[in-house]
Amino acid sequence: MVDARENMNHFIELKEIIVKSDGRIILNIPHALIPTDRICACIGPNGAGKTTFLKLIDGLITPDSGSIVHSSSETRSSLVLHHTPMIKASARINMALVQDADPSISSADIDAVIIQIGLSQLANSPAHKLSAGERQKLCLGRVMLQKPNLVLLDEPTANLDPTTTEQVEEIIRQFRQRGSSVIFTSHQLAQVQRLADYIVFIDHGEIKEKGPVGPFFSSPQTQAAKRYLHQELLSE
Ligand SMILES: Nc1ncnc2c1ncn2[C@@H]1O[C@H](COP(=O)(O)OP(=O)(O)OP(=O)(O)O)[C@@H](O)[C@H]1O
């Protein structure tokens, strides 16, 4: 019998969660423990509810019913959505917006992160003109400055080239190495296998399967997961 907590030191417990949109149920999770002590990938078909799941965990949306309990006393999450709008100002000013919420972030901190993410040459360029990869690095730089203990990333490498994808994956590993937990969504199964320790598979608004990454890929338990893996592997 598998331990119900699957050796999770920290987790989020979802109970009787229903999220609706326009009267339609888009998430239905009777009960689930989601680990917050590792890198967790949330995968599933388009429209399954993955982005909604991240927003729910972040508290950006509240469920129509049900509750979310964090095992740690203080969870500070940062969510990076797929299309983050930028204000019409430089990359540096966009990065410095995090100071509004946390005035203890210094200009020196911002400069250090700009160097770390490789945007020094573009710091004074208009942020809305940055490429997709540069924008994503800027967003991840903001997260570094916020120092959340839970990092939530929606398709962090969608539309990025292989080099930038590798750089973003390295930033994700650094979040974990510095003690943050990460939950990211992805349609790239090779990436999921490179980065994640744990899988949450969502289909039609329900968590159909979850568990450590190895067993999920080698012996998925549900027909939905088997079908999804088969189709995705054919398209990769
Ligand atoms: N604000 C909204 N208003 C109406 N419907 C919404 C809203 N947000 C999400 N939905 C619907 O909820 C369902 C789940 O959407 P969600 O974006 O969470 O899926 P996803 O798994 O992230 O999809 P993808 O892989 O395509 O990004 C979809 O059917 C979507 O149309």
Image: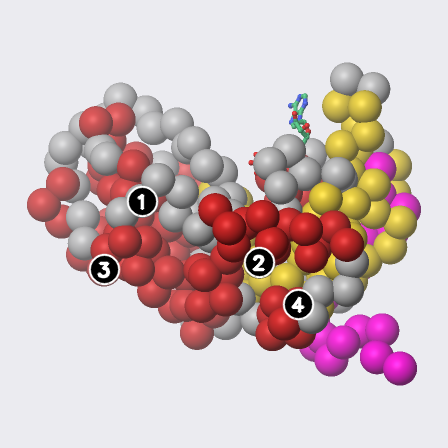
Q: Residues within 10 Å of mark 3 (few under 14, many from 20)?
A: some
Q: Which mark is residue 116?
A: 3
**SS category of the residue bearing label 4:** helix
Residue positioned 81% across, 23% down in the render: 24
Which element is circle 1 on? loop
Q: Is residue 76 left or right of residue 105?
A: right
**2 or 4: tag closer to the N-terminus:** 2
Residue beneath label 1, please?
160
In the image, is residue 4 part of the stretch drawn in magenta?
Answer: yes
Specify the quarter for ligand 1: top right
Residue 45, by quadrant, is top right
The first of marks 1 and 3 along the sequence is 3
Please count the marks in the image: 4
What SS does tag 2 mark? Answer: strand
Q: Residue furthest top?
A: 22
Whole-angstrom CA distance, mark 2 to mark 4, is: 11 Å
